[in-house]
Image: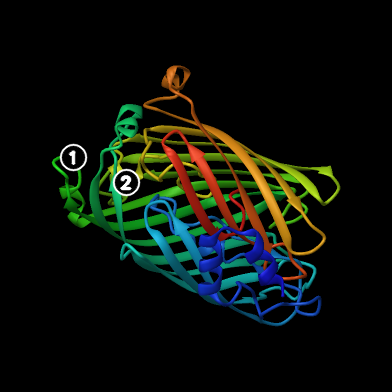
Amino acid sequence: MPWLRVLRLASSMLLAMALAAGTPVSAASDPGPSSGVVVDPAAQTTPSIDMSDPAPPGTSQRSGTGITPIFAPIPFKHTQLGWGLAVLVGAIHRFDPDTTIKPSTGGVTGFYSENKSWGWMIVEMARLQQDRWRLRGLAMHADVRYDFFGVGQDAGDAGLSVAIEQTMDVVLIAALRRVTPNLYGGGSLLWIRTGAELLHDHGLPAPPDVEDLATANLLAPGIQLEFDTRDDDYWPSRGSIATVKSNFFTSALGSDSDFERYMAAWCWYTSVRGPALLLAMNASVTAATGDVPFWAIPSVGAGLYGLRGYTQGRYRDNVVTTVQAELRAHSKGRLGATVFGGLAQVGGSVGDLWNAEVLPAGGAGVRYQLTREYPMHMRADYAWGKNGGIFYFSVSEAF
């Protein structure tokens, strides 16, 4: 059995979690060519404490006809939330009769973690008019418990934190239109209602705006651009994907704070030795300006392109940059392995990065392909950062 081969290679912790998970993540169990579609559930369910950017776009694979149901239990290990389980129930469907176009995806997800954090999300990612338009809608509620370490390099080095419980309701709508064959651009509108409570200060000062978050309402129009030439959504062997996002929270539209958040990321993929050995690289920058709430300040290790090896939120400041590289090997069967490394910096401004300390990270991991037809993987990684090692367990690649 494929699971037994994985268990012999994985660590004892991975073994225990894999057995507890029971059912691998899949759409319609183990689809063959006739079903034709698998969705990446991790793009919709991986929890993050960086909730000002609630969800990456999520992608589907290949084409098909009709409606394909999705049921996906997804165990995970999060640096702040601990072990947890996310569950996705949804469907892959079509608004366009052209079956050569990737289909639309909708679903409901929920998660619960060992530190009593929980949440749910409803999402729809629609492709219309032969993929000329990409419409996205999301609604979610989250109640998460996490540690806040402060802002800046010195606060991260100190490693002292206060415990916070934060609730958040989010609604996001976005519309992107195809500009060229691989380029999409458009706008978004993000609404957030949030509140925070100090659970324990450990004798440390609390974030200055915790009390202000009791009834905070935030509204932000935004701009999004995507350029995608990858040959595969899950395990690319060539091509690249570039993403630019911005959100402008403004009191002119009723927001309780005036600030902006920006994110730009680029991933590049190439084959080193056929499909058996690939190289993936990533660079990203996240920045925030204005009256930024403490939870919206960018941090190392958070989000889709987070650097492994650092607790989410331990190092945060107005500007965070990350550079990563990963060598990915795969057998002719379902097994794979990776080695990776990266660097990150945090600073109060772009100019401060020239003198900021470089935060190094590196690690290795194993992969198990969840379906025979499509290279979507369960992953187990162990990464080392400046402050020690961290174990990760989830679905899909880090970038």
Residue 311 lies, with reference to residue 323, above or below; the image says below
Spatial separation of the CA atoms under disc 2 and disc 1 = 11 Å
Mark 2 and mark 1 residues within 8 Å of each other at the beta carbon: no
Q: Which x, y percent locates residue 148? A: 28, 44
Q: Residue furthest right?
A: 274
Position of residue 207 in the picture relative to residue 116 (left or right): left
Position of residue 192 in the picture relative to residue 256 (left or right): right
For disc 1, the neighbor class at 10 Å (few under 14, some 14 to 19, many from 20) is few
Query: For mark 1, what is the residue?
Result: 208
Position of residue 142 in the picture relative to residue 399 (left or right): left
Residue 383 lies, with reference to residue 31, above or below; the image says above
Rendering quarter of residue 48: bottom left
For residue 10, say whether it is visible. Answer: yes
Residue 225 or residue 382, whichever sits in front:
382
Residue 282 or residue 79, whichever sits in front:
79
For disc 2, the neighbor class at 10 Å (few under 14, some 14 to 19, many from 20) is some
Q: Residue furthest left?
A: 203
Residue 357 lies, with reference to residue 178, above or below; the image says above
Question: Which part of the image, by quadrant, shows the N terminus?
Answer: bottom right
For residue 300, say whether it is visible. Answer: no
Q: Which x, y percent locates residue 379? A: 60, 58
Q: Of the residues shown, which amino acid type is indicated by label 1?
A: Pro
Q: Secondary structure at mark 1?
A: loop
Q: Residue at x 79, y 64 (%)?
A: 333
Q: Earlier in the sequence, mark 2 or mark 1?
A: 1
Q: Residue at x 19, y 47 (%)?
A: 210
Residue 295: numbered disc: 2
Q: Residue at x 63, y 47 (%)?
A: 226
Q: Which x, y percent locates residue 199? A: 18, 54
Q: Secondary structure at mark 2?
A: helix
Position of residue 196 in the picture relative to residue 110 (left or right): left
Q: Of the residues shown, which amino acid type is indicated by label 2?
A: Trp
